[in-house]
Image (spheres, grey):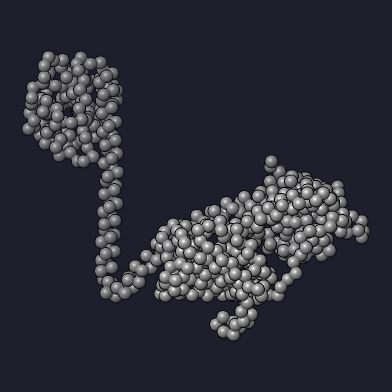
């Protein structure tokens, strides 16, 4: 056994020491009998776990034992077990003072039972063992500190040798560190916004399912009712559903990460359609002045991304103006012959505020990612860089003018497009295809409301429709009732829509398909399917009919092989 776990015994009268030694050795404890306090002090230098001392063996407060106690390291609080004699009155002052100097003392009054003594000894050893563990940890820390000190000394020596040579570089590095800290703080904020975007995208499917069922059934009611008041009330409800769908679509712009879908876009309609969202975003205290151009400019743009860009500019303007101010959003057509901008016709959206303005020295940095003049937590530094990126991807540009104390005007310049004729918002519920009989359509959607609406809408349009609530159930109908067209939801338990399409095409490569989805980020799906094969929720009956007709008349080629996923036939989960 280690000397650090032995028990020192000091009992100067009778056979007490031998009796205690015999008792403790039976308990597996190593013991050493000492003849005096001086011998105890000498043995403590070598190491021990605890000391048992009888009261009558206590000596002078000036003994070597007291010197050893006062010299203990910080981690040590050596345990003593004092066997006291029952007495009347106080102990002698010298004995009392020595006990106080000893500190960690357990007093047991004699006569005592052997088990009581053994228990006290083991308790003292456990406490001493924890002190040894503390000593070990402190030693390791000191050793690590020593190594770190040596490493730091070497590093400082190296830095000192190169101070003159690297002084200018060190100054630049300091500036970069400060910028990096600012960028990290901005990145943390952007990650929070990304989490919000992911949450928004996650709930989009269910919410768009609800809107699809609501809006679609209202269309069916409007197509069948002859009662004016019912039609009027249904029309009000449809307008509300349209606003809800538009608001959801605008919110989903925060979570989109797919390539831009550039199409001719009516800038006047887009700007005016954002009025409600802008009021809710920047508040009612600020005046919002919409100035659509009478020339009705159209631009080649991704509508959702352009809305996001305008919303970012409006939020920046709100932060610059505070509680009071005026925000002007205008559109116009412009012809440019400036080589820097690119010659040609441009459709322009300008956002102007009456805020604090931007210092001239910062104007060249405002479109840099993570650059922001707002306090930490008040901005990500990504808003204007997103605006710039959206304009660049649209083959356009962004310009900025600002005067401190007067405000800022930012213009998004996009390639002009020819005005388009809007599709009619309603359709006649009559069979759309009669040549060759009624086309058979298989609808797979786990949402009962959406599934019922699609089935009834297609039946009203003249299709022979079957439905299934899950991918496995739908695939089983490919053999028993071969369809001419497959319409399948994307997000479903068990097999998702892409997995269903892969398995369906493995069995019937020529089968036309339409994938319905309410998600915003569908880049992975669009790499497999063409845009004509994707029907975004919430959709109107006219859009459903168009998607079905296009799919039945011209099946787009598959963009990549569609191998069957290994787990494609797993069981559907509820």
The answer to which image quadrant residue 320 occupies is: bottom left
The answer to which image quadrant residue 77 occupies is: top left
The answer to which image quadrant residue 75 occupies is: top left
Instruction: Tell me: 144 left or right of 278.
Output: left
Instruction: Tell me: 446 left or right of 91.
Output: right
* 363 to 253, vertically: above or below: below
| Residue 411 placement (x, y as % from top left) | 55, 73
- At 46% across and 73% down in the image, what residue appears? 402
View extreme (right): residue: 436
Note whether residue 155 is visible: yes
* 376 to 53, vertically: above or below: below
If the image is split into quadrants, where does the N terminus sit? top left
* 213 to 285, vertically: above or below: above
Instruction: Tell me: 226 left or right of 209.
Output: right
- At 42% across and 72% down in the image, what residue appears? 404
- At 82% across and 56% down in the image, what residue appears? 485
* 206 to 86, vertically: above or below: below
Count of marks, rendered view: 0
- At 57% across and 68% down in the image, what residue appears? 329
| Residue 69 placement (x, y as % from top left) | 15, 35
Note whether residue 558 is visible: no
| Residue 374 placement (x, y as % from top left) | 43, 62
Which is more toward the observer, 498 or 306? 306
If the image is split into quadrants, where does the C terminus sit? top right
| Residue 33 placement (x, y as % from top left) | 17, 25
Which is more toward the observer, 21 or 490? 490
Which is more toward the observer, 302 or 416? 416
């Amino acid at each position: 056994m280690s000397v650090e776990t032995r028990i020192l015994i000091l009992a100067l009268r009778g056979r007490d020491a031998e009796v205690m030694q015999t008792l403790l050795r039976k308990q597996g404890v190593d013991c050493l009998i000492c003849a005096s306090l001086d011998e105890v002090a000498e043995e403590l230098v070598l190491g021990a776990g605890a000391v048992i001392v009888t009261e009558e063996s206590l000596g002078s407060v000036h003994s070597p034992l007291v010197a050893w106690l006062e010299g203990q390291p910080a981690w040590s609080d050596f345990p003593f077990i004092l066997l006291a004699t029952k007495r009347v009155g106080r102990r002698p002052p010298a004995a009392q003072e020595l006990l106080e100097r000893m500190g960690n003392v357990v007093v047991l009054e004699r006569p005592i039972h052997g088990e009581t003594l053994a228990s006290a000894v083991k308790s003292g050893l456990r406490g001493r063992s924890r002190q040894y563990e503390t000593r070990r940890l402190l030693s390791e820390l000191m050793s690590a500190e020593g190594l770190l000190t040596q490493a730091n000394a070497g590093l400082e020596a190296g830095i000192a040798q190169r101070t003159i040579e690297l002084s200018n570089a060190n100054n630049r590095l300091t500036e970069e560190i400060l910028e990096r800290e600012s960028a990290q703080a901005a990145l943390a904020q952007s990650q929070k916004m990304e989490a919000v975007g992911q949450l928004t995208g996650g709930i989009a499917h269910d919410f768009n399912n609800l809107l699809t069922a609501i809006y679609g059934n209202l269309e069916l009611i409007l197509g069948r009712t002859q009662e004016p008041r019912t039609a009027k009330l249904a029309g009000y409800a449809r307008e509300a559903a349209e606003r809800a769908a538009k608001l959801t679509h605008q919110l989903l712009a925060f979570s989109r990460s797919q390539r831009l879908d550039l199409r001719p876009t009516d800038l006047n309609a887009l700007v005016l359609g954002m009025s409600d969202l802008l009021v809710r975003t920047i508040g009612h205290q600020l005046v919002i002045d919409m100035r659509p151009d009478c020339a009705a400019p159209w631009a080649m743009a991704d509508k959702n991304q352009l809305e996001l860009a305008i919303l970012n500019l409006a939020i920046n303007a709100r932060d610059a103006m505070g509680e009071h101010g005026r925000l002007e959003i205008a559109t116009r057509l412009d012809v440019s012959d400036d080589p820097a901008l690119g010659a040609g016709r441009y459709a322009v959206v300008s956002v102007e505020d009456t805020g604090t303005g931007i210092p001239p020295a910062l104007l060249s940095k405002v479109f840099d990612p993570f650059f922001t003049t707002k306090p930490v937590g008040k901005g990500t530094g990504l808003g204007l860089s997103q605006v710039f990126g959206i304009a660049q991807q649209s083959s356009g540009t962004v310009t900025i003018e600002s005067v401190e104390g007067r405000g800022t005007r930012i213009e998004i310049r996009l390639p002009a497009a020819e005005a388009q004729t809007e599709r009619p918002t309603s359709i006649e519920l009559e069979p759309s295809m009669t040549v060759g009989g009624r086309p058979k359509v298989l609808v797979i959607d786990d949402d009962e409301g959406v599934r019922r609406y699609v089935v009834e809408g297609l039946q009203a349009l003249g299709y022979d429709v079957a439905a299934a609530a899950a991918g496995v159930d739908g695939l089983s109908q490919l053999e028993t009732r071969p369809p001419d067209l497959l319409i399948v939801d994307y997000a479903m338990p068990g097999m998702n829509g892409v997995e269903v399409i892969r398995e369906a095409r493995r069995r019937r490569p020529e089968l036309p398909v339409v994938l319905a989805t309410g998600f915003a980020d569908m880049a992975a799906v669009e790499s497999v399917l063409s845009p004509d094969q994707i029907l975004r929720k919430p959709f109107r009956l006219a859009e459903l009919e168009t998607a079905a007709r296009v799919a039945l008349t011209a099946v787009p080629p598959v963009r990549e092989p569609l191998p069957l996923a290994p787990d494609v036939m797993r069981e559907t989960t509820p």
